[in-house]
Image (cartoon, rainbow, N blue to C red):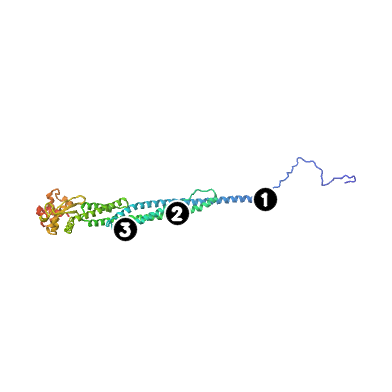
Amino acid sequence: MDDDGVTDIADSDVRPDAAVDATAPQSTPRRRGPSRKATVWWIVGAAAVVLVGASVTTVHIHANRSFDAAASEVITADAAADDASDALLAAAQDAAAAIGPADEIISVTSSSEGLVAAEVRTAFTDARTATAEAVATAEAVLADAADPASTVKPAWTWELFDAAPLLHENAEDLESYADTALDTEAAVEASHEALGASATAVFAAVTPAAAALEAANVSARTVAVLDFRDAALAAAQQTQLRAEAAGALATYAARAATLQQSAQAELAEKAGPLLATRLEIEEYARSIASGVLLEFDWSPIVNGLGGQDGMAGTATWNTARGGFSKITLTNSVAEEWPSADSRALVAHEVGHAITSKCSDMFDSDSQSANEEWATAWAISIGHTADGNGVQAYGYPSQAMIDAAAGCR
């Protein structure tokens, strides 16, 4: 400032306003950006989000795979369980179907002694019991079959994780059931097979038992014997344990009863002081009849003869059903037994009876030829007494004797 109080402005830091050059570049005020530290944290946060998302995705994928694997186990195990159930059911049904016929066979063969050997029937009964028990076990296993769990996939990860071990456990249950079913099936089949084998033994046992029954009831009428033989043969020819086999055994048992009743009735008719001798004569006749089935009647008079008037007999012959005959003898034959004439007369009647198997060896339609044949047959086995027929019908030709000698 000068003496006049005027401040002199010169070379001062304070400049007067200068004129603005419009052509000079204008500076723009700078905006302050985020700090470097903030930027780093933003990047870290973003990366964390990405990592979390990736982890969640990985976990979900793992959960899916675990569920899928467990579901696949269930599907596979369920298919195996179904197959095992089907096999067990079929085996149980087959075995159960045999129990009914087995029960009937046991019933009918137990109705009378001697139809089959006792030890065979006992073994069959035991086999039936074992099969019934195996079938009952199979039914219990089938009733307790494991059910497959649902394999519908849930949406949430935690649900997938929760379901997977449950599915795995269910698959193990199904596998365990399948193993049990297969083991049970094997047991059922084994018991069923054993029952079938035992039934075969029963069928085979009929033949020797029937022979023994026939021998024990030899006095039965020929029709009863022939019917019994047919029934025994049908029973012995059975091969499978089914209703037809049970029916055959039932018929066999019924015919056996008829055979026994017939024999008892015949013995009652022959009862008396001559019974033992009559049975001895009948046994002799059967022993020379070469298998022709014989039945006997006894009478005081036959063809006007008998008693004090001598001995007589008649015989029929029939080629049907293997050959059979009915011989009728006077009581005097038994009274004279075992004289040569009585034995020769019996041989003559058996000669008629045996025509049942040799009717084509002579003119069997001729009555006179029949008598010549019977006489020749008695001679051919060594009976030379007059009772052989020579006295009544004359001596047969040598040709007839030779022919008769060929019938045995």
Residue on which the image places disc 2: 175
Q: Amino acid at mark 2?
A: Glu
**Whole-percent x and y of residue 279?**
18, 57
Q: Secondary structure at mark 3?
A: helix
- Confirm whether residue 335 shows in the render: yes
Classify 10 Å Cα crowding around label 2: few (below 14), some (14-19), many (20 and above): many
- Dot 2 or dot 3: first in sequence order is 3
- Confirm whether residue 380 shows in the render: no
Q: Residues under labels 2 and 3: Cα distance?
A: 39 Å
Q: Secondary structure at mark 1?
A: helix
Q: Amino acid at mark 3?
A: Thr
Q: Are marks 3 and 1 in contact (CB under 8 Å)?
A: no
Q: Secondary structure at mark 2?
A: helix
Classify 10 Å Cα crowding around label 3: few (below 14), some (14-19), many (20 and above): some
Residue at horizontal 22 percent and vertical 52 percent from the top: 224
Q: Residues under labels 2 and 1: Cα distance?
A: 60 Å
Q: Nearer the viewer, residue 268 or 194?
A: 268
Q: Nearer the viewer, mark 2 or mark 3?
A: 3
Q: Nearer the viewer, mark 3 or mark 1?
A: 3
**Whole-percent x and y of residue 204?**
28, 56
- Dot 3 or dot 1: first in sequence order is 1
Residue on which the image places disc 3: 122
Q: Residues under labels 3 and 1: Cα distance?
A: 99 Å
Q: Are marks 2 and 1 in contact (CB under 8 Å)?
A: no
- The label shown at residue 38 is 1
- Dot 2 or dot 1: first in sequence order is 1
Query: Is 25 situated left or right of 278 in this image?
Result: right
